Amino acid sequence: MRYYTMTELKASGPLDGLDAYTDLLADALYSLHNVTDPDLGATLSTGRIDVTMIVDADTLEEALHKSLTATRTAIHAAGGATPDWERMIREVGTQARELTDA
C-alpha cells in the first residue's frame, strides 16, 4: 500500500539561518531512496517545517516508521541534529493516510 505522510518539525535556536538550512534539507530529502515525492514547506518566522512524502508499506505503523526514518536521515544529511527525537516527535506530530486509486 502507499501512504502519504506529513511530519511537522519545529526548529530550535536562532532562526536566521533557517532559510539556508531548509534548502539543504530539501536537497537531502530529494536524494533519498525508498520514498516518493518528498517535499517540505516552512514558516521561517516560527521555525515550523512540514515534511511530506509518499512511502510504500504494508501497515500504517510501517509507513510512519519509514517516513520518520527518512526525515531524520535527511535532517542529519543536511547538518542538523535530532536530540531527544523519540520524545520530541510525539509532541510535534506525524500523520499518515493510505492512498487509494481514483
Image (cartoon, rainbow, N blue to C red):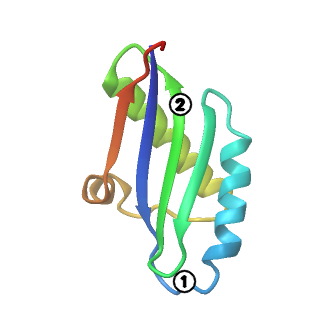
Q: Which residue is mark 1?
A: 15
Taking the spot 74% from the left edge, 41% from the top edge, the residue there is 31
Across and down, in percent, residue 21 comes to: 66, 69
Q: Nearer the viewer, residue 5 or 100?
A: 100
Which disc number belongs to residue 7? Answer: none
Measured Cα–Cα span from mark 1 to mark 2? 28 Å
Q: Quadrant of residue 59?
A: top left
Q: Nearer the viewer, residue 84 or 4?
A: 4
Q: Farthest front residue? A: 102
**Kind of residue at disc 1:** Leu
Taking the spot 32% from the left edge, 52% from the top edge, the residue there is 86
**Kind of residue at disc 2:** Ile
Indicate whether 90 appears above or below 60.
below
In which quadrant of the rendered image does the N terminus lie? top left
Across and down, in percent, residue 88 comes to: 31, 60
Taking the spot 31% from the left edge, 52% from the top edge, the residue there is 93
- Could you tell whether 53 is left or right of 37 in the image? left
Across and down, in percent, residue 63 comes to: 41, 27
Judging from the image, what secondary structure is the residue with disc 2 in?
Answer: strand
Which disc number belongs to residue 54? Answer: 2
